[in-house]
Amino acid sequence: MPNPRKEKLVANIADALKRSKAVLLTDYRGLTVAQISDLRRRLREVNAEYHVVKNTLFARAAKEVGYDVGTLEGPTAAAFAMNDPVGPAKVLMEYMQENKIPVPKGGFVEGRPITAEQFEALSKIPPREVLVAQMLAGLQSPLTGLVGSLQGIISNLVYTLQALVDKKAEAAKA
C-alpha cells in the first residue's frame, strides 16, 4: 500500500511541474545548508523555487505530468521557474561559477527535455524582456525609415509647390 506522505509529495511535485515554465535539475552534492539557503533566496528573486527532490518521487510525478525523465542518478534538486526559464538558469550557472557547485543535470523547458549542455546554453540567452525589446526595435527600424522617406517626399513636394508659387508670382509682377 502506497505511503500517504509520499503520495502527497508526488502530488506537490506534479503540481509544481504543471505550474512552472521550466524545471532545471541540478546535483546539489557539496552544498551546505547556508549555500542552499542563499541559492534559494537568489532564485526567489527571479520567481523560481529550489527544492531537493527524491529521484523516484520526482520521476513518478514527472510521469504523471507526461514528462520522461529517464534515469536520475545522485542527489537531485529542482529549480521550478514559474515565468522566464532564462533567469533561474542564469542564477544557477552564476552560482556554479562562483562555488563550482551545483552541477547541472538537465531539465525541462515548457515540457521539452533539455540536456545539461542546453541548460548552460539557456543561461546565456538574454532575458525575455530584452529579446522582446530587440525584436520591437528591429520592427521599428524599417518603419522609422519609411516615415523618414515619406517626410522627405512630402517636404520636396512642398518646396516644389512653393517654388512654383514664387515663380508664378514673379511672372505676374512682370
Image (cartoon, rainbow, N blue to C red):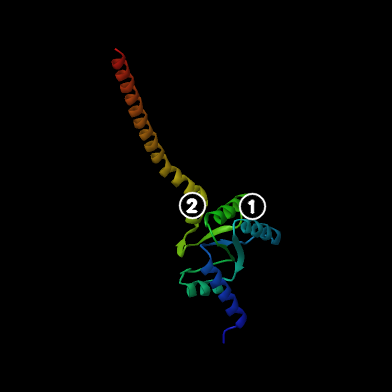
Q: Identify which residue is drawn at 58% across, 73% down.
A: 12
**Residue 97 in the image, given as x and y percentages of width and height:** 60, 50
**Which amino acid type corresponds to the residue marked 2 in the rendered image?**
Ala
Determine whether the residue tagged by mark 1 lies in a helix, strand or loop.
helix
Measure the C-alpha gap from mark 2 to mark 1.
19 Å
Instruction: State the image quarter where residue 164 is shown.
Output: top left
**Residue 105 in the image, given as x and y percentages of width and height:** 53, 61
Earlier sequence position, callout 2 versus callout 1 = 1
As displayed, is residue 133 above or below residue 106?
above
Direction from residue 129 to residue 174 in the image, left or right: left
Tell me the quarter of the image containing the C terminus: top left
**Residue 145 in the image, given as x and y percentages of width and height:** 39, 36
**Which amino acid type corresponds to the residue marked 1 in the rendered image?**
Asn
Direction from residue 9 to residue 37 in the image, left or right: right
Determine whether the residue tagged by mark 2 lies in a helix, strand or loop.
helix
Q: Which mark is residue 121?
A: 2
Instruction: State the image quarter where residue 1 is shown.
Output: bottom right
Q: Which mark is residue 89?
A: none
Which residue was labeled with disc 1?
Answer: 99
Q: Identify which residue is drawn at 50% across, 56% down.
A: 119
Q: Which of the pair 120/162 is nearer the observer? A: 162
